[in-house]
Amino acid sequence: MADKINSTVYWALAIIISLIAIRLVSLGLFPLYDTTEARYGEMARIMVETRNWVTPQFDYDVPFWGKPPIQTWLSAISFNFLGINEFTARLPHLLCGLLTCYLVFRFTLSLTNLSKSVLSILVLVSSLGFIVAIGMVMTDSALLLAYTLAMFSYWQCYAQKNQLYGYLFFVSLALGMLIKGPVAVVLIGISLVVWSAWQGCFKVAIRRLPWVSGMFVFLGLTLPWYILAEIRTPGFLEYFIVGEHIQRFLVSGWEGDLYGTAHVKPRGTIWFYWLLCASPWSFLALGLLFKKENIKKALRKEPDQPNINKYLICWVISPLLLFTLAGNVLPIYVLPGFSALAILIALNIKFTKLCNYLALFTVLTLIAMLSALLKGAWEHKSEHKLLELHQKSFKEAPLYYWNKRPFSGQFYSNGRAKQINEKAYLRDLVNSSGKIYIAIKQDEFIIFKDLFDVHCVVEEKSTVRYLLVCNDKFENKVSIENSTD
């Protein structure tokens, strides 16, 4: 029996290492995709170029008020030391995911044995949403790390009566405020309030924390950046606190977004997203939930012994409760509960070969997804192919995007791409004697076909746009007319 258990654990470790290795190798294989990855990647590139480490910028001299700076700092620091490319943009976010794995392992090990701790990592790493998200340039991998640290620290402070973990809890809150803002504190608060009420230990739970000195730590780490950000760009606090954290979630189709469009979804969509992103383990978790003995175990009152299952359940459902009534949600919003789900499953199932088979499903799914990307499945979501061979040329001749300039267009032109929307201005540019580049959608170039036939040729072509060079010497070039046959 011991040999079988050891064999299962060894195979689990092999699967964990394989998933992480595949994700690591994949970081540099694909361009930064619009909108999220390319936007945050470009903000980090601008931060390095301008040396403005206080205010993330949506574009040159245009402040980005939508998020605090940590996710931009992560990629910007990586760019600064390792160079600007896709791998270095994504690497810090993968490292955040690995640190989360370590915290989950430590948390589980404090509750049970080594093999179960390995199982918790297997569940986390093989959750589809987790393994995909930690290799992307966005806020959520760092948020998951801060959330996991906060919940781990609080439990140790409460169960072990260790004040050092109490201070670490407030450090975690500060990290959350600098990663995502007040919503991070709200998520943690929902988890702890619901759990303490369910456990019947609300007053004791409050008294466990070193509130006075802990708040000094929290405010000392948080306020300097928020104050400086408001001084640098007045209006930040009103937009970020009221707009991004109240109106965005309560007003369906909110039109106050300065940086994009609201994601209008039916109320309750977040639960479907959880089922999808936490697969294949979400289905196993639902099966555990509806077993009578598990329900009795979770509901059993133990006033002198805190119930870890109750704690983990509240942690899992906290983001789901918060976003159930939200009109604007994304699938990634379910991620903060994944660490708890991994520990909950590890504590309540037997570690058998079935666990490894479920994890292998994720390995195969991930390989299939990456293969599809390598074949160009999302080529239309990035300007990399259109611009990659001509980046040096944009130093000598300006690049203009007609009607819309994607964030990847900014990133892959090193910030040199400009957007134009007026037909007369575009005609004046093309009729001038200077060499210019124009990126235009294939279904829109017909508007200026008479002009392009005389002055321009196709320099590059993607599935969405042409890159035209105008007023150049057209030796051995492909004409517009030939390229659209």
Image (cartoon, rainbow, N blue to C red):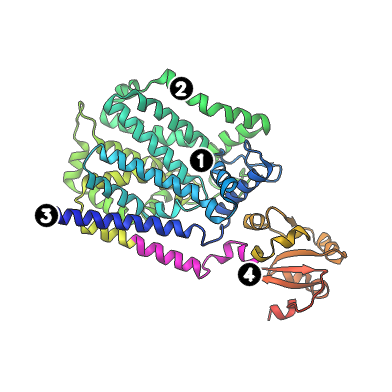
Residue appearing at x 31%, y 58% in the figure: 15
Question: Regarding mark 3 in the picture, which secondary structure is present there?
Answer: loop
Q: Nearer the viewer, mark 2 or mark 1?
A: 2
Left or right of 388, for residue 219: left
Q: How far apart are the alpha carbons under marks 2 and 3?
A: 51 Å
Q: Which part of the image, by quadrant, shows the N terminus?
A: bottom left
Residue appearing at x 62%, y 57% in the figure: 408
- What amino acid type is highlighted by mark number 2? Met
Q: Which residue is mark 1?
A: 250
Give the mark, 3 or 4, whose residue is nearer the N terminus: 3
Q: Which residue is mark 2?
A: 215
Q: Which part of the image, by quadrant, shows the C terminus?
A: bottom right
Q: Based on the displayed image, in which of its 4 quarters is residue 389 positioned?
A: bottom right
Residue appearing at x 43%, y 28% in the figure: 170
Magenta span dominant secondary structure: helix
Where residue 130 appears, as percent x and y from the top left, is 40, 51
Q: How far apart are the alpha carbons under marks 3 and 4?
A: 57 Å
Give the mark, 2 or 3, whose residue is nearer the N terminus: 3
Pick the front one: 284 or 390:
390
Where residue 62 appears, as percent x and y from the top left, is 69, 43
- What amino acid type is highlighted by mark number 4? Ser
Q: Is residue 207 visible?
A: yes
Give the mark, 3 or 1, whose residue is nearer the N terminus: 3
Question: Regarding mark 1 in the picture, which secondary structure is present there?
Answer: helix
Q: Which residue is mark 4?
A: 462
Residue appearing at x 51%, y 38% in the figure: 179
Q: Which residue is mark 3?
A: 1
The stretch in magenta equals 362-386
Q: Nearer the viewer, mark 1 or mark 4?
A: 4
Is there CB contact under 8 Å for labels 3 and 1?
no
Q: How far apart are the alpha carbons under marks 3 and 1?
A: 54 Å
